[in-house]
């Protein structure tokens, strides 16, 4: 199933699929792909679902590449922000297990949940927050590069 078809199977009319990485606007600069013709579209999860989940920590984006779904959070990488990103990841996984299941069914096997940091990486590596991020498989990176 293609990314766009998966998005269209989700019963939420607020979720709009844009071509390429257009849903990410300026944040698209943090995602590099080797073949842009293999991009299947993108959605701004946060903005699209803010009316449905107004008081939740929502994940930022999803996009399709080579018929797999990737989920990207653009967020500062400070020790004090790890808990927020983990809440967003928890929310995303719950949403994907229910309403967003068509996207979950086509998620990539590796790097499907990616935290891309802006400015600098400032998480203390000996902190409990860093360990929590590692345990959840969500260490921030500067950019996502996909072949």
Image (cartoon, grey):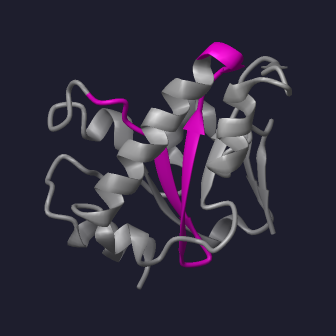
Q: Residue 122: horizontal and vertical position, in percent? A: 81, 17
Across and down, in percent, residue 35 comes to: 75, 69
Q: Was residue 65 drawn as part of the magenta stretch in this picture? A: yes
Query: What residue is rendered at 68% in x and 64% in y?
Result: 36
Residue at the spot 54% in from the left edge and 78% down from the top edge: 67
Counting every numbered tag in the picture gives 0
Where's residue 103, x and y in %? Answer: 39, 68
Q: Quadrant of residue 100?
A: bottom left
Segment colored magenta = 56-80
Which is nearer the eye, 121 or 24? Answer: 121
Which of the pair 20/81 is nearer the observer?
81
- Image coords of residue 135 (percent x, y): 67, 48
Residue, far right: 125
Nearer to me, 8 or 81: 81
Against 33, residue 104 (above or below) is below
Q: Quadrant of residue 10?
A: bottom left
Q: Horizontal placement of 125 versus 35: left or right?
A: right
Residue at position x 22%, y 61% from top?
A: 99
Quadrant where the C terminus lies?
A: bottom right
Q: Is residue 128 toward the left or the right of residue 68 in the image?
A: right
In reply to whether residue 111 is colored magenta, the answer given is no
């Amino acid at each position: 199933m293609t990314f766009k078809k998966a998005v269209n199977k989700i019963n939420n009319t607020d979720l709009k699929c844009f071509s390429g990485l257009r849903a990410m606007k300026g944040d698209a600069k943090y995602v590099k792909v080797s073949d842009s013709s293999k991009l299947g579209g993108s959605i701004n999860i946060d903005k699209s679902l803010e009316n449905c989940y107004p008081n939740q920590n929502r994940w930022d984006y999803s996009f399709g590449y080579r018929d797999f779904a990737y989920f990207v959070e653009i967020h500062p990488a400070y020790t004090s922000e790890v808990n927020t990103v983990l809440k967003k990841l928890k929310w995303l996984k719950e949403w994907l297990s229910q309403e967003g299941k068509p996207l979950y069914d086509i998620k990539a096997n590796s790097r499907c949940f990616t935290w891309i940091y802006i400015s600098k990486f400032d998480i203390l590596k000996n902190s409990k927050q860093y360990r929590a991020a590692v345990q959840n498989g969500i260490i921030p990176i500067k950019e996502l590069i996909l072949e």
